[in-house]
Amino acid sequence: MRTLKEIKELLAELDHCIADDLEDQDIDFKQWNEHSLPDSVDLVVKIAICMANGGGGTVVFGIAERKQGLANAVLGVPPEVDVNRLKKAVYDRTDPKITPVFEELRVPQGTGRLLVMQIHPGLPPYTDTSGRGVVRIGKDCQPLTGTLRRKISVETGESDYTVETVNAEPKTLLSPSAFEQLRDIAAKERAPDDLLQLADMDLLAALGLLHQGRLTRAALLLTGTEQAIRERIPGYVWTFLRMKSDTQYSNREDSSQALPKSITRIEEHIAPYNHITTIEYGMFHFEYRTYPAVALREALTNAFCHADYRVGSPVMVKLYQDRLEIGNPGGFIAGITPENILHHEPAPRNPLLVDALVRLRLVNRSNLGIARMFEAFLIEGKQPPSIEEIGESVRVVMHNTSLSPGFRAFIADHSRKGRLFSVDELLILYHLLHHPEIKTQDAACLCQRKEKDIRGILAKMNMEEFLERGGTGRATYWTLRPEIYQEITGDRYPEGSRRIDWEAAKTRVLSVLMERARRGEPGLGNKEIRQLAHFDRFHVIRLMKELKAENKNLHGPGRGRYATYYFNEAD
């Protein structure tokens, strides 16, 4: 939820954008219908249900969502609207009951009054008293369909498939080799020795995987025999394919072995193609794999932990010549999307299974796994993985790209000096090695951060002389310092791709126009000036407007697609 101070900061952005651009999972803006109080109350109830089902959030009433400029967007709420009546309406018309908190925010625009509704997180699903419901997904309120109701029950832990018990004598279902594999993997991750030294049944009890002496499905997934898993968890299966093309494969294996054995077996399939390469670069000697071991283990563990074993689709691993794809059935839950997964709070689909793996140090509860996966690729100067949601499944794609020795040495050298780069900083550095610049809003999107947060990260990198800043306000952009580019790549910075200073741009454009006039050649169009100065279309219009005001000999651009600016010495 957002504080009044944070809301005031957001409102200040309305001079540069519309309210819809500022909306997020936990913040919404709504215009108040001054012509119909019942319609407005209906909207308050609906959006309260939406936010409650989406994990809580803040709604600001009195804002036109599609208008830019404070004076145009801030319309306000009439002073006669009683917040106690709104609170009672929400409470009376929701099931389970929702008790919103309303705050007034005084503003100089419109009616002078905005209403801020705070919805605290609860235990969804919530509906109105007629059984209708909506849920917040991203910036939208979507109907609470059967599929979404099921998702909510998964998110709240009410329908944890792995917590259900199996009716059979435990020892007939367990695999000694699976226990051995589980202990070996956990020991490598430095799980507590006193936990790993317990007898098999005691270990399961300590992990919370027994219920009244019976095995849970989570226990079976971790330590069961393949036959027992197939009979009692038919939706658990994985498939490995070594792809020759997009439609043909040369090797395939399908299995329902226990989770630790499955991960090890899949890694064995990938190992012959996950080559180790040694590179000497100055005083550094780097050994690296095509797909970093840390990232590979994280991706496989995530796929098995977050799979929906009710669906009956396999965890699918496809190894291509140029990429590795790891997918699992079951889409994202709890508002997680490919656009926010890097920093979103974790939301396990199978809480009991994940909790056991956390205690064995095989999974991180703090959602560091995705960041570690990205970091493993980025510190080697490789393209980070891409994460996609395709229908009701999630896929991680790791690309087969080469190590950048210069980038790896740059990171290692700064690490020795005590300067550790965050994943956000690595993403920005990687981007700027392949693109001439990045705007603040694009950096926020790249790093999955809010603009106010990314500004601080960029400012710090600028202060430490990794980046240079250009432009002002919403047009601010950032470039890699030439000396940093040269340190990493060993090449001179390509100055031709670098945006030039505002005054320098004027000088360059005027010089070219004067030279063209002297030779009797045509002037320059907007597109040509964009190529000269590396500005966008609207910056060129503003630049030329200023330049014309300063030079009476400068004319244009006229009208039409091929309109040009030209210099006339005779004036």
Image (spheres, rainbow, N blue to C red):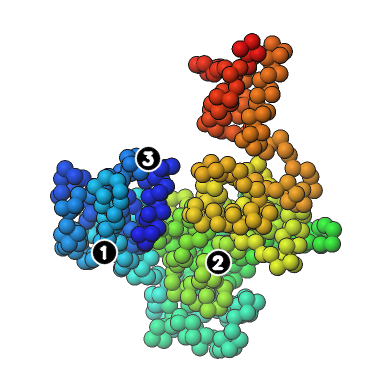
Residue 291 visible here = no
Q: Which quadrant of the rendered structure holds the C terminus?
A: top right
Q: Are marks 3 and 2 in contact (CB under 8 Å)?
A: no
Q: Are marks 2 and 1 in contact (CB under 8 Å)?
A: no
Q: Secondary structure at mark 3?
A: loop
Q: CA distance from mark 1 to mark 3?
A: 28 Å
Q: Is residue 172 found left or right of 398 in the rendered image?
A: left
Question: What secondary structure is marked by label 2?
Answer: loop
Labels 3, 2: front one: 3
Q: Residue at x 22, y 56 (%)?
A: 45
- Is residue 14 visible in the rendered image? The answer is yes
> Residue 291's x, y, as percent?
67, 58
Seen at 69% across and 11% down, the residue is 520
Using the numbered discs, state the Cα–Cα distance from disc 2 to disc 1 in whole angstroms. 33 Å
Question: Residue at label 1?
Answer: 101
Tag 2 residue: 368
Q: Is residue 203 above or below residue 373?
A: below
Mark sitting on residue 68: 3
Compare residues 553 and 509 and report the one nearer the observer. Answer: 553
Image coordinates for residue 145, horizontal then vertical, percent: 29, 54
Residue positioned 57% across, 62% down in the render: 371
